[in-house]
Amino acid sequence: MSNTSAVQNMAMTVALVDLIDAGEALLQRTIPATEIPRLRQFSIARVSGAPVLVVFGADAPVEVHLVAAQVPIRMSRDRVDSEVDTYRSPASIAGLLCGMLGRKPRLILRAIRRIEAAASWARERQEGRQREAANILAAQASQQDQLGAIAALSAIASQDAQPPATRAIGVALGSGPNNPAPGTPVFIGPGGDLTFK
């Protein structure tokens, strides 16, 4: 492999790894749960008249579809390439794509830019999902505050509905010209007047 081919493969590999990171972030759970974007396809190149697609979203891993070959290839950093496995490493797919594009720098750069656009789309959707989750949490907190206020108002209203004799506010502390005997209950009357019983 020449130095030029190695540089092309490396540039494509970096873009594909970034795409995997964005695709995995897109599928991360949010709390509370938010909807994962529906399946999305990005055309990154055309080979022999057939598109090369990057597909992700829904619950699918990041896939590169070589339409001419009729085979979806899933990218994974964790798997080792094998003949029977549909998973391939980003470096393996990068070499394949660069070769399919005839090692033409213009076509490779275009494909890389389109891969970067797909990764950017995935990041923006994930940020949107995180904002949505934050908005849901803020709305729930506001609703909980409203429920607390309703409960407090209900308690006050039920207390106001009770007859004055049941709403003792304390007991008299001592006797004197204006105070009843010690231990006498003190009540609030209907007009807000203090009464002693």
Image: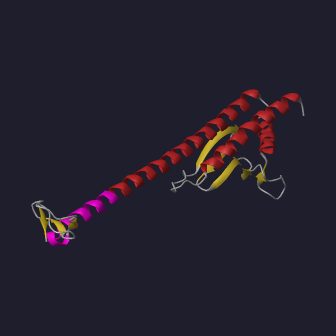
Which quadrant holds residue 121? Answer: top right
Q: Is residue 61 above or below residue 6?
A: below
Give whichever of 133, 26 is nearer the camera. Answer: 133
Give the farthest residue toward the front. Answer: 176
The rendered magenta stretch, by its main secondary structure, is classed as helix
The quarter of the rendered structure image containing the C terminus is bottom left
* Image quadrant occupied by the N terminus: top right
Residue 155 lies within the magenta run: yes
Q: Is residue 48 visible?
A: no
Residue at 49 percent of width and 50 percent of height: 133
Residue 194: horizontal and vertical position, in percent? Answer: 13, 62
Residue 158 screen position, x and y as percent: 22, 67
Residue 125 visible? The answer is: yes
Which residue occupies 85% across, 33% down? 6
With respect to residue 142, does 194 lie above or below? Answer: below
Image-based side of 138 in relation to 183, left or right: right
Q: Residue at x 79, y 32 (%)?
A: 8
Q: State how the image is colored.
A: secondary structure
* Front position in the image: 79 or 95: 79
Q: How many marks?
A: 0
- Could you tell me residue 138's position as x and y percent? 43, 50
**What residue span does the magenta drawing correspond to?**
147-166
Whole-percent x and y of residue 87?
77, 53
At x 44% / y 48%, what residue is drawn? 135
> Which of 135/150 is in front?
150
Is 187 one of the magenta-colored residues?
no
> Is 189 situated left or right of 45 in this image?
left
Q: Is residue 48 above or below residue 109?
A: below
